[in-house]
Image: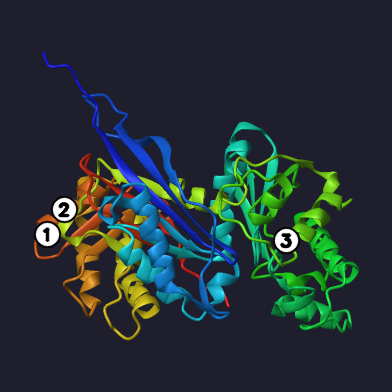
Amino acid sequence: MKRYEPLKEEIISAGIDIGTSTTKIVLSQFSLMNMAGGTHLPRIEIIDKEIIHRSPIYRTPLLTSTTIDIEAIERLVRNEYDKANVGSEDIKTGAVIITGETATKQNAEEMIHHLSNHAGEFLVATAGPDLEGIIAAKGSGAYQYSKKMSKTIANVDIGGGTANVAVYRMGRLCGTCTLHIGGRLIEFSEDKISSISPPVRNLLREWNSTLAKGDVMVEEEVKKITNYMADVISRMLTRTMTAEDKILLLGHEPNWKEEIDVIMFSGGISECLYQYESKGVEQAPYHDIGTMLADSLKDSQSLKGWSWIQPDETVRATVLGAGTQTTEISGATIQVETKDLPVRNIPVYQISFKDGFQKSVHHLKNAVKDAIEIHDPQQEGQNFALYLSGFPYVGFRDIQQLAKGLLEAVKQKNKRDQPLIIVLESDHAKVLGQTLVAQDSSQSIICIDQIKVEHGDYLDIGQLLQTSVVPVVVKTLTFHS
């Protein structure tokens, strides 16, 4: 009798972080394995992640103060791939994440989509301050710490332009917040101020300060600003921000309810605190407020009220999170056509079944009409995924009825040759997908499960792997201004 050998596969993931100050690349190798026994339904999981290449820390190349140098970024990426002896065709998953003030550049969206199409067979384009904070917390070790310890931890990732905060307790995301606080918000040339970012200018106006571009740098005046930034971080963590503090708020206010027990700092400013990086990486004098901001954090009496946990990574936290923590696996019970994969940047429309199965099926036509109005109002062919949530226990006749309702509902779409993309949290993708194919063999189907998404999320679904699973990345495409 032949001994059962579990299915195994290895894939390469890329993480590319293009930040306000620096650009980093990390390549990782994922090991996939069927964790179910030979007589059970396959359950493919990522069992190991190994970092196989880390790039130096590069200064982010810009053409002007408002434009990213796309060609220079692409050359940088290709050079790092060559060093690692990896081709773009070898990349099966991962993330390009544009962070901080870089996301406000004129060509940010163009650059990130260009790179995601040229840097790998399946590579994600992501941005948005909330997602930055979440990814950084996974790369810094804060997320893993929260799973081991019964404490609420806030990871504060401070780079050149923003401080992205993610709060976790026992592996659960409690909330996020982002502030205009970072090392490059004030820059110097020799002994004069060469630039002041708009949020800091707004703050200075509130203070009736005359500090301006071209002024001689007086350390006491600048230190007043960095000390204030440290205090704002403290008040943000306790959810007691003042009206003045909110001048530095980017997006929503702190949205967690838990009291924070411990804090962790990652990002470029935490590198000024901990100095993890070897002297061999490409470094240049900062010419900004980064080191002063780090000193203000260390000296802040209000921040000393928390225990500080040292991160696993400082300046590389976001890129490591992007390269190793963004991918999920959907498999075993899926229905996909390989010719339709990969798909990128697919918006999600959620259809809840919490009001009952029959009622929800009856409303499918209206739900798809709403999805078209939101995601493809001009009927230009923007596809979207339908996320069927709160799925009850169903029998085969229910599945047949659901398939019929879905096929009828999507007839409202202008572009009929697009795949019908269905996402389920429960293990019904195979039976639903096969039923859809049986009822209309002309309709292309991508039906995946074991994935949890929400309204406003976007999906990338990769090529079918040898283990008959697909890598899936759930993301938020938000280019803040």
Q: Residue at x 37, y 66 (%)?
A: 115
313 sits to left or right of 197: left
Dot 3 crowding, Cα within 10 Å, few <14, some 14–19, many 20+: many
Helix, strand or loop at label 2? It is helix
Residue extending furthest toward the top: 1
Q: Which mark is residue 435?
A: 2
Q: Position of residue 463 (x, y in %)?
A: 24, 53
Helix, strand or loop at label 3? It is helix
- Among the two numbered marks 3 and 2 on one chain, the one whose residue lies closer to the N terminus: 3
Q: Which mark is residue 439?
A: 1
Q: Which mark is residue 324?
A: none
Q: Nearer the viewer, residue 367 or 193?
A: 193
Q: Nearer the viewer, residue 67 or 463?
A: 67
Q: Position of residue 480 (x, y in %)?
A: 56, 74
Dot 2 crowding, Cα within 10 Å, few <14, some 14–19, many 20+: some
Vertical placement of residue 86 versus 112, above or below: above
Q: CA distance from mark 1 to mark 3?
A: 61 Å
Q: Which mark is residue 290?
A: 3
Vertical placement of residue 200 versus 16, above or below: below
Which amino acid type corresponds to the residue marked 1 in the rendered image?
Answer: Gln
- Viewer-side label of 1, 3: 3
Q: Nearer the viewer, residue 361 or 79?
A: 79
Which amino acid type corresponds to the residue marked 2 in the rendered image?
Answer: Thr
Which amino acid type corresponds to the residue marked 3 in the rendered image?
Answer: Gly
Residue 16, located in which quarter of the rendered image? bottom left
- Which quarter of the figure is the C terminus placed in? bottom right
Q: CA distance from mark 2 to mark 1?
A: 6 Å
Residue 355 appears in the picture as rendered: no
Residue 437 appears in the picture as rendered: yes
- Which quarter of the figure is the N terminus placed in? top left
Q: Are marks 1 and 3 in contact (CB under 8 Å)?
A: no
Q: Are marks 2 and 1 in contact (CB under 8 Å)?
A: yes
